[in-house]
Image (cartoon, rainbow, N blue to C red):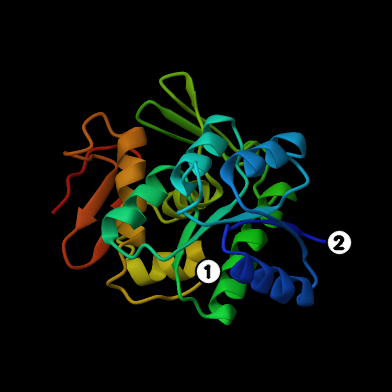
Amino acid sequence: MSTKHILVVEDEQHLAHGIKFNFEAEGYRVTVVGDGPTALKLVEQDSQGIDLVILDLMLPGMSGYAVCEALRDRGSDVPVLMLTARTLAVDRRQGYSVGADQYLEKPFDLEKLLSEVDNLLHRRNRRLSGGAQAGDVLRFGEAEINFSTFEARVAGQPLRLTPIEMTLLRYFAEHEGRVVDRTELLENVWGHATSPATRTVDNFIVRLRKYFEKDPSRPRHFLSVRGAGYRFLAAGDGESV
Protein backbone atom coordinates (compact mmCIF):
# COMPACT_ATOMS: atom_id res chain seq x y z
CA MET A 1 0.00 0.00 0.00
CA SER A 2 1.37 3.40 -0.99
CA THR A 3 2.04 6.04 1.63
CA LYS A 4 -0.92 8.34 2.08
CA HIS A 5 -0.27 11.98 1.22
CA ILE A 6 -1.80 14.64 3.48
CA LEU A 7 -1.86 18.32 2.56
CA VAL A 8 -1.85 20.63 5.60
CA VAL A 9 -3.06 24.18 4.88
CA GLU A 10 -2.11 26.18 7.97
CA ASP A 11 -0.42 29.58 8.28
CA GLU A 12 0.68 29.14 11.91
CA GLN A 13 4.07 27.59 11.26
CA HIS A 14 4.62 26.07 14.70
CA LEU A 15 1.26 24.31 14.55
CA ALA A 16 1.71 23.22 10.94
CA HIS A 17 5.12 21.70 11.65
CA GLY A 18 3.79 20.02 14.79
CA ILE A 19 1.06 18.35 12.73
CA LYS A 20 3.59 17.41 10.05
CA PHE A 21 5.96 15.87 12.61
CA ASN A 22 3.27 13.77 14.26
CA PHE A 23 1.71 12.52 11.04
CA GLU A 24 5.08 11.66 9.53
CA ALA A 25 5.77 9.69 12.70
CA GLU A 26 2.61 7.71 11.88
CA GLY A 27 3.94 6.91 8.41
CA TYR A 28 2.15 9.54 6.34
CA ARG A 29 3.69 11.79 3.72
CA VAL A 30 2.88 15.42 4.60
CA THR A 31 3.06 18.64 2.60
CA VAL A 32 2.54 21.97 4.38
CA VAL A 33 1.43 25.22 2.73
CA GLY A 34 0.39 28.49 4.35
CA ASP A 35 -2.27 29.88 2.01
CA GLY A 36 -5.30 28.85 -0.02
CA PRO A 37 -4.17 29.59 -3.61
CA THR A 38 -1.06 27.45 -3.16
CA ALA A 39 -3.18 24.60 -1.79
CA LEU A 40 -5.59 24.78 -4.73
CA LYS A 41 -2.71 24.79 -7.19
CA LEU A 42 -1.16 21.69 -5.60
CA VAL A 43 -4.44 19.77 -5.67
CA GLU A 44 -5.05 20.78 -9.28
CA GLN A 45 -1.57 19.70 -10.32
CA ASP A 46 -1.80 16.36 -8.52
CA SER A 47 -5.50 15.60 -8.04
CA GLN A 48 -4.94 11.88 -7.48
CA GLY A 49 -1.79 12.25 -5.42
CA ILE A 50 -3.28 14.03 -2.41
CA ASP A 51 -5.39 11.76 -0.23
CA LEU A 52 -6.66 14.24 2.36
CA VAL A 53 -6.58 17.96 3.19
CA ILE A 54 -6.33 19.37 6.73
CA LEU A 55 -7.56 22.93 6.31
CA ASP A 56 -7.41 25.94 8.62
CA LEU A 57 -10.21 28.49 8.22
CA MET A 58 -8.45 31.75 9.06
CA LEU A 59 -5.89 31.92 6.28
CA PRO A 60 -4.33 35.04 4.73
CA GLY A 61 -6.13 36.39 1.68
CA MET A 62 -8.44 33.42 1.09
CA SER A 63 -10.44 31.76 3.84
CA GLY A 64 -10.61 28.03 4.39
CA TYR A 65 -14.30 28.20 3.47
CA ALA A 66 -13.40 29.63 0.06
CA VAL A 67 -10.66 27.03 -0.43
CA CYS A 68 -13.00 24.14 0.31
CA GLU A 69 -15.76 25.56 -1.87
CA ALA A 70 -13.29 26.01 -4.74
CA LEU A 71 -12.12 22.42 -4.40
CA ARG A 72 -15.70 21.14 -4.66
CA ASP A 73 -16.53 23.50 -7.54
CA ARG A 74 -13.54 22.11 -9.43
CA GLY A 75 -14.82 18.58 -8.97
CA SER A 76 -12.42 17.40 -6.27
CA ASP A 77 -13.80 14.83 -3.85
CA VAL A 78 -10.67 14.70 -1.70
CA PRO A 79 -11.64 14.44 1.98
CA VAL A 80 -11.36 17.79 3.78
CA LEU A 81 -10.98 18.09 7.54
CA MET A 82 -11.37 21.65 8.78
CA LEU A 83 -9.19 22.44 11.79
CA THR A 84 -10.04 25.79 13.31
CA ALA A 85 -10.34 27.96 16.40
CA ARG A 86 -13.81 29.07 15.28
CA THR A 87 -16.24 27.31 17.60
CA LEU A 88 -19.66 28.80 16.81
CA ALA A 89 -22.37 26.55 15.43
CA VAL A 90 -22.77 28.87 12.44
CA ASP A 91 -19.09 28.32 11.55
CA ARG A 92 -19.52 24.55 11.68
CA ARG A 93 -22.65 24.73 9.51
CA GLN A 94 -20.87 26.89 6.96
CA GLY A 95 -17.93 24.47 6.90
CA TYR A 96 -20.19 21.56 6.08
CA SER A 97 -22.20 23.62 3.60
CA VAL A 98 -19.11 24.30 1.45
CA GLY A 99 -18.18 20.62 1.39
CA ALA A 100 -16.07 19.79 4.45
CA ASP A 101 -16.19 16.16 5.58
CA GLN A 102 -15.23 16.81 9.19
CA TYR A 103 -14.78 19.83 11.46
CA LEU A 104 -12.44 19.80 14.44
CA GLU A 105 -11.91 22.68 16.84
CA LYS A 106 -8.63 24.04 18.19
CA PRO A 107 -7.15 23.32 20.60
CA PHE A 108 -7.46 19.69 19.56
CA ASP A 109 -6.44 16.38 21.00
CA LEU A 110 -3.77 14.77 18.80
CA GLU A 111 -5.25 11.28 19.12
CA LYS A 112 -8.63 12.67 18.09
CA LEU A 113 -7.11 14.28 14.99
CA LEU A 114 -5.26 11.08 14.08
CA SER A 115 -8.47 9.08 14.53
CA GLU A 116 -10.52 11.44 12.37
CA VAL A 117 -7.95 11.33 9.58
CA ASP A 118 -7.78 7.54 9.76
CA ASN A 119 -11.58 7.31 9.48
CA LEU A 120 -11.73 9.61 6.46
CA LEU A 121 -8.92 7.78 4.68
CA HIS A 122 -10.49 4.39 5.43
CA ARG A 123 -13.74 5.45 3.78
CA ARG A 124 -11.85 6.85 0.79
CA ASN A 125 -9.89 3.60 0.43
CA ARG A 126 -13.07 1.54 0.54
CA ARG A 127 -14.68 3.65 -2.15
CA LEU A 128 -11.64 3.70 -4.43
CA SER A 129 -11.17 -0.06 -4.08
CA GLY A 130 -14.69 -0.68 -5.30
CA GLY A 131 -16.45 -1.23 -2.01
CA ALA A 132 -19.78 -0.85 -3.75
CA GLN A 133 -20.95 -3.51 -6.18
CA ALA A 134 -21.37 -2.81 -9.88
CA GLY A 135 -24.92 -1.77 -10.66
CA ASP A 136 -25.53 -0.66 -7.09
CA VAL A 137 -27.93 2.20 -7.84
CA LEU A 138 -30.36 4.04 -5.59
CA ARG A 139 -33.31 5.84 -7.19
CA PHE A 140 -35.80 8.04 -5.38
CA GLY A 141 -37.75 11.11 -6.40
CA GLU A 142 -35.81 12.67 -9.25
CA ALA A 143 -32.49 11.35 -7.92
CA GLU A 144 -30.26 8.56 -9.14
CA ILE A 145 -27.21 7.59 -7.09
CA ASN A 146 -24.64 5.12 -8.42
CA PHE A 147 -22.50 3.95 -5.51
CA SER A 148 -20.09 1.98 -7.70
CA THR A 149 -19.16 4.96 -9.90
CA PHE A 150 -19.65 7.62 -7.18
CA GLU A 151 -22.02 9.53 -9.45
CA ALA A 152 -25.26 11.29 -8.57
CA ARG A 153 -27.92 13.00 -10.68
CA VAL A 154 -31.03 14.96 -9.86
CA ALA A 155 -33.55 15.49 -12.68
CA GLY A 156 -30.82 14.36 -15.06
CA GLN A 157 -28.31 16.95 -13.87
CA PRO A 158 -25.03 15.81 -12.28
CA LEU A 159 -24.56 16.48 -8.58
CA ARG A 160 -21.19 16.40 -6.84
CA LEU A 161 -21.36 14.66 -3.46
CA THR A 162 -18.58 14.42 -0.89
CA PRO A 163 -17.48 11.01 0.39
CA ILE A 164 -19.32 11.56 3.68
CA GLU A 165 -22.53 12.52 1.90
CA MET A 166 -22.31 9.41 -0.26
CA THR A 167 -21.64 7.18 2.74
CA LEU A 168 -24.57 8.70 4.61
CA LEU A 169 -26.87 8.16 1.64
CA ARG A 170 -25.77 4.55 1.35
CA TYR A 171 -26.41 3.92 5.04
CA PHE A 172 -29.91 5.35 4.75
CA ALA A 173 -30.57 3.23 1.66
CA GLU A 174 -29.42 0.08 3.46
CA HIS A 175 -31.75 0.88 6.38
CA GLU A 176 -34.70 2.31 4.50
CA GLY A 177 -37.83 2.72 6.57
CA ARG A 178 -36.09 2.27 9.91
CA VAL A 179 -35.62 5.10 12.40
CA VAL A 180 -31.88 5.65 12.82
CA ASP A 181 -30.64 7.74 15.73
CA ARG A 182 -27.74 10.19 15.65
CA THR A 183 -25.39 7.98 17.67
CA GLU A 184 -25.82 5.11 15.22
CA LEU A 185 -25.10 7.41 12.29
CA LEU A 186 -22.03 8.88 13.97
CA GLU A 187 -20.67 5.42 14.68
CA ASN A 188 -21.37 3.90 11.27
CA VAL A 189 -20.92 6.84 8.91
CA TRP A 190 -18.37 9.04 10.68
CA GLY A 191 -16.64 6.13 12.39
CA HIS A 192 -16.86 7.36 15.97
CA ALA A 193 -19.39 8.06 18.69
CA THR A 194 -19.68 11.66 19.81
CA SER A 195 -22.24 13.14 22.15
CA PRO A 196 -25.74 12.76 20.69
CA ALA A 197 -26.08 16.52 21.13
CA THR A 198 -23.66 17.12 18.24
CA ARG A 199 -25.11 19.00 15.27
CA THR A 200 -22.95 17.17 12.75
CA VAL A 201 -25.67 14.74 11.68
CA ASP A 202 -28.34 17.44 11.59
CA ASN A 203 -26.19 19.65 9.37
CA PHE A 204 -25.72 16.85 6.86
CA ILE A 205 -29.44 16.05 6.82
CA VAL A 206 -30.08 19.69 5.93
CA ARG A 207 -27.68 19.29 3.02
CA LEU A 208 -29.34 16.09 1.75
CA ARG A 209 -32.75 17.76 1.89
CA LYS A 210 -31.41 20.74 -0.03
CA TYR A 211 -30.07 18.42 -2.73
CA PHE A 212 -32.94 15.96 -3.06
CA GLU A 213 -36.20 17.33 -1.65
CA LYS A 214 -38.51 19.40 -3.84
CA ASP A 215 -39.39 21.40 -0.72
CA PRO A 216 -36.65 21.03 1.92
CA SER A 217 -38.93 22.62 4.52
CA ARG A 218 -41.41 19.76 4.04
CA PRO A 219 -39.23 16.70 3.41
CA ARG A 220 -40.78 13.51 2.04
CA HIS A 221 -37.66 11.32 1.84
CA PHE A 222 -35.35 12.36 4.72
CA LEU A 223 -37.71 12.50 7.66
CA SER A 224 -37.19 13.69 11.23
CA VAL A 225 -38.67 11.61 14.02
CA ARG A 226 -38.80 13.86 17.05
CA GLY A 227 -36.69 12.58 19.93
CA ALA A 228 -35.61 9.50 17.99
CA GLY A 229 -33.60 10.34 14.87
CA TYR A 230 -34.18 10.14 11.13
CA ARG A 231 -35.89 7.85 8.64
CA PHE A 232 -35.34 7.53 4.89
CA LEU A 233 -38.21 6.64 2.54
CA ALA A 234 -37.41 6.21 -1.15
CA ALA A 235 -41.10 6.32 -2.08
CA GLY A 236 -41.37 9.76 -0.55
CA ASP A 237 -44.79 9.24 1.00
CA GLY A 238 -43.89 10.10 4.55
CA GLU A 239 -43.62 13.25 6.60
CA SER A 240 -41.57 14.34 9.60
CA VAL A 241 -43.17 13.93 13.00
Question: Which residue corresponds to mark 2?
Answer: 1
Task: Give x and y (percent) for residue 139.
Answer: 45, 33
Task: Give x and y (percent) for residue 40.
Answer: 63, 39
Among the 4 quarters of the image, the one containing residue 55: bottom right
Determine the residue located farthest toward the right in the rendered image.
1
In the image, 234: left or right of 165? left
Kindly check if marks 2 and 1 are in contact, taking CB atoms under 8 A apart as contact.
Answer: no
**Crowd rating for badge 2 (residues with CA inside 10 Å; few <14, some 14–19, many 20+):** few
Q: Residue at x 27, y 37 (%)?
A: 236
Determine the residue located farthest toward the top in the rendered image.
156
SS type, badge 2: loop
Question: Which residue corresponds to mark 1?
Answer: 191
Q: Quadrant of the N terminus?
A: bottom right
Q: Please state which of residues 30 and 210 is positioned toward the viewer in this rendering.
A: 30
Among the 4 quarters of the image, the one containing residue 75: top right
**Residue 215 visible in rendering:** yes
In the image, 29: left or right of 131? right
**Crowd rating for badge 1 (residues with CA inside 10 Å; few <14, some 14–19, many 20+):** some
Determine the residue located farthest toward the left in the rendered image.
241
Q: Amino acid at mark 2?
A: Met
> Against 137, is 106 above or below?
below
Q: Quadrant of the C terminus?
A: bottom left
Q: Please state which of residues 121 and 171 is positioned toward the viewer in this rendering.
A: 121
> Against 52, is 185 above or below?
below
Q: Please state which of residues 39 and 112 is positioned toward the viewer in this rendering.
A: 39
